[in-house]
Image: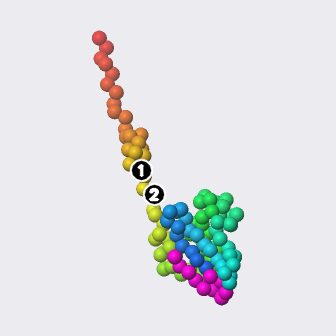
Amino acid sequence: MPVLQQDDLTLSYGWDAPLGYYFLIVEQEGKLVYSNLDDPQALAGPYGGGLTLMHLQAKLQGFGVVLDLPELDALAGHTPASSPRAPALTQLLDALNRPAPEATDPEPT
């Protein structure tokens, strides 16, 4: 988890793997100034309190921190491309997407 000291601010940010989103906590002299969990915009977003990488970048810029490309790439590397599926779900999706076997019509007698 990166922790930056910016003047009298301490910024802690990174990828929260169990929750599957980015977080940001900003403190000034030990007092909480910002937390993504208290941010109405983050709460209203798709992650229920979490930030996307773009939101994190914008929030950091608001506090005077601009991440360079290697730092952004390192953060983005913590984002899984897709969540693994449970085996039962994978089997169900495979069955649903498999072409139906051709029905054999009984020959008329």
Quarter that holds the C terminus: top left
Kindly identify the amino acid type of the residue bearing the numbered disc 1. Answer: Ala
Q: Position of residue 104 (x, y in %)?
A: 32, 25
In the rendered image, residue 8 lying in the magenta stretch gets the answer: yes
Quarter assignment of residue 65: bottom right
Residue 62 in the image: state x and y as whole percent: 67, 77
Which region shows up in magenta? 1-10
On screen, 88 above or below 58? above
Residue 89 percent across, percent down from the top left: 42, 46
Q: Secondary structure at mark 2?
A: loop
Q: Inspect the magenta stretch and tell me whether residue 4 lies in it.
A: yes
The local secondary structure at tag 1 comes to loop
Residue 90 sits above or below residue 52 on the image = above
Could you say where residue 84 lies in the image, as x and y percent from the top left?
Answer: 42, 56
Q: Nearer the viewer, residue 65 or 33?
A: 33
Marks 2 and 1, Cα distance to the nearest angstrom? 9 Å
Mark whose residue sits in front, 2 or 1: 1
Residue at which label 2 appears: 83
**Nearer-the-camera pick, 79 or 87:** 87
